[in-house]
Image (tube, coloured by chain):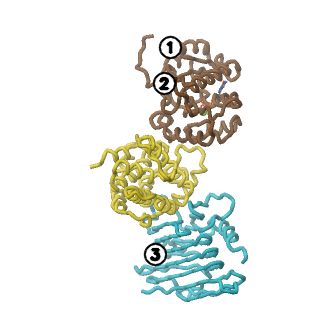
Chain colours: A brown, B yellow, C cyan
Amino acid sequence: MPETPTRAMRLGIAGPVGTGKSSLIGLLCSRLTDRLQLGVVTNDIYTDEDARLLRSAGVLDPDRIRAVETGACPHTAIRDDITMNSIAIEDLERDYPGLQLVLVESGGDNLTATFSPALVDAQIFVLDVAGGGDVVRKGGPGIARADLLIVNKTDLAPYVDVDAARMVQEGTAARDGRPVIGLSRLDTKSVSAVCDWVLATLASYDAGTHTAHDPGPMAAHSHTQ
Amino acid sequence: MMSGGALLLGDARLPTGGHTQSAGLEPALLTGLSPASIPGFIVSRLRTCVRVDAGTAVVGLRLLYAGAPLDPVVDAWCARTPSEVVQAASIEAGRGYLRLHQRLTGFATATPALPRPLAVAALAHSWDLSAAELARIICHDDVQSVCSAALKLTPCDPVDTVSWAVAAGDEADRVVTEVQGLDDPDDIPAAAAPEMELWQHAHGNASRRLFRA
Amino acid sequence: MTARTTRVLARLTADGSVQVELATGLLAPRVVRQHGTTVEIALVATGATLLGGDHLRVELSAQDGTCLVVRDVAGTVAYAGGGRISHWDNEIQVGPSARLVWHAEPLVLSDGAQVHRETHADVAGHGRLLLRDTVVLGRAGQAGGELTCRTRIWHDGRPLLAEDLVLDRHTRALPGVLGARVLDTATAAGWRPEGPPDATVLHLAGEGAMARSIVDEAHHSEIHAVWRQWADQQCASL
Ligand SMILES: Nc1nc2c(ncn2[C@@H]2O[C@H](COP(=O)(O)OP(=O)(O)O)[C@@H](O)[C@H]2O)c(=O)[nH]1
Ligand SMILES: [Mg+2]
């Protein structure tokens, strides 16, 4: 029987700037705070913009939201030197015994940034429709192999001439069947789908059946499908 | 010859969170240091707070080799670091080293928090470094933290920052010579740069920071 | 060159009053007032100080249970010393439950002055010390002479503050060392003054605080207000 973990699950949230990572954390906090002991670590390049935004949203006790400076190296802070993020998470665990889930927002970075498996147990990669329908096809380790891909702001699709359903479909194809969710905060069903995915992942983590895997480096470029 | 341990400690790729530190440069630039003065700023630091840190590290290393407690040298460092903001930033940076140390060797200090120079000294002790190597590392890390942060904070050519580090070499040599033989906490240099201290002190309340300190 | 020591020692007598012992050096101590266990002393210059080669030494001691308030009657000007260094040593003792406040006036370094100042203070467990220290580099229109200040303050047998300031022309021109003519400092040792959070206040790791302001004109210093507040907390009875 696999060992059950003794510490909170760490869920990383990566993706380009402005795709909705902080908003997603806000949604998850407001939906899950009654059921789970939550903590948040943010990594915005400008100190605590994200932390402040989340604190002022009032979705979680402000002390459970910690900001980590990255010295303008958001990629380094989640991948090659995770020290300060690890310390922030360990502090949250020390300050809040019984913590179940820590959400770690990466400072918005390019498509190649993914979390080190030593920092998080699972990760979500967030894109939005406004970034263009072909972003998914362009790929990258997060898009191809994060535990969950979110195509956010589907409500905006008609305004940016993007077919959101097709984006989700192409994502699913590019990800060998790994999950993709089209999300809009205006669409409660899609919000529930993301919450359900988080809860299911946490349940398998708690049961000791979840394996962290690394989306890995940028895949070798190939034009064949 | 530099030992392997010394090279590891002098390498910014060592995972200890060094990329979050600007060695006082960001606070300085936010408060009015002109980018043209950065080479002089590097020398100012070597004359003052880096001397304090290097001396602290060396005395700490001697105490560790002697199996003696670090408390007197922690006190001496605190007395030479009046701003609680600067103290906290150093202790936080020290945690990066302590965490690495703990993961590698199970090392645990009796004092749960150590300022950065003493956390580095503890690793230096594990890796059998000499006092001179340790003092050199403290200087090198500070100079390079300023240089690499300058690339993020000001428009400059990476080659220029290397020339600053080279130009600061003599001053760094003097620090190493001066502190390498220290063994008494009371003899740790106490040279201060009051203006820089106030700049760094203000960083605790700065918004839109890129660097922790 | 021998030091001429100015000495002020306050001790409690058996009947609960304060007995003061005074000695005159380059500065002469005068009792201004005495009330209960508090005694206020003024330090008066006995001649033109500080000249090149002068060695001014001040010993202040507030023994167990006394409150010693020291005021300078005027600031001190260090004159061009023709290459001769002037020394100024302060030796301060604060006994258990004693209080000592020194309302020091500015030390002004004229062009050509070279001053080496050392301040050593020992504050016992429940003693409280409050020091003002204003240095002005240059009289009006001058760049000012050279100053080194060595400060060591101990509290309850442990180092509380150790600072060496090298303010020669070369060093103080380095970025981040001083940046202006006036360095104004208030230091509390053995206690943590109360007050609204203030950007100028550094909270020492031990029991103590230091408030600092670096300005071009002494009257712009932010320390005046901090000082009044801290001094009121220290010896409210005067
Ligand atoms: N229309 C729409 N806008 C969204 C949605 N989610 C986030 N946004 C907006 O996208 C912008 C960037 O969001 P933010 O969470 O700060 O992105 P981050 O940089 O990835 O953290 C903000 O203006 C949000 O209000 C969504 O579902 N629909
Ligand atoms: Mg964000």
Mark 3 vs mark 1: give the one in front.
1
Looking at the rendered structure, which numbered label has been put on residue B118? none
Q: Do tags 2 and 1 sit on the same chain? A: yes
List the residue tagged with mark 3: C116
For marks 2 and 3, give the CA distance: 65 Å
Q: In the rendered structure, the residue with mark 2 lies on which chain?
A: A
Q: Residue furthest front?
A: A1
For marks 3 and 1, give the CA distance: 76 Å
Q: Residues within 10 Å of mark 2 (few under 14, many from 20)?
A: some
The residue at 58%/84% (across/down) is C8
B2 and C221: which one is in front?
B2
Q: In the rendered structure, the residue with mark 1 lies on which chain?
A: A
List the residue tagged with mark 2: A213
In the image, what residue type sits under mark 1? Asp
List the residue tagged with mark 1: A176
Work out whether residue B164 can be spotted: no
Quarter of image, res C228? bottom right
In the image, what residue type sits under mark 2? His
Q: Is residue B81 above or below residue C63?
A: above
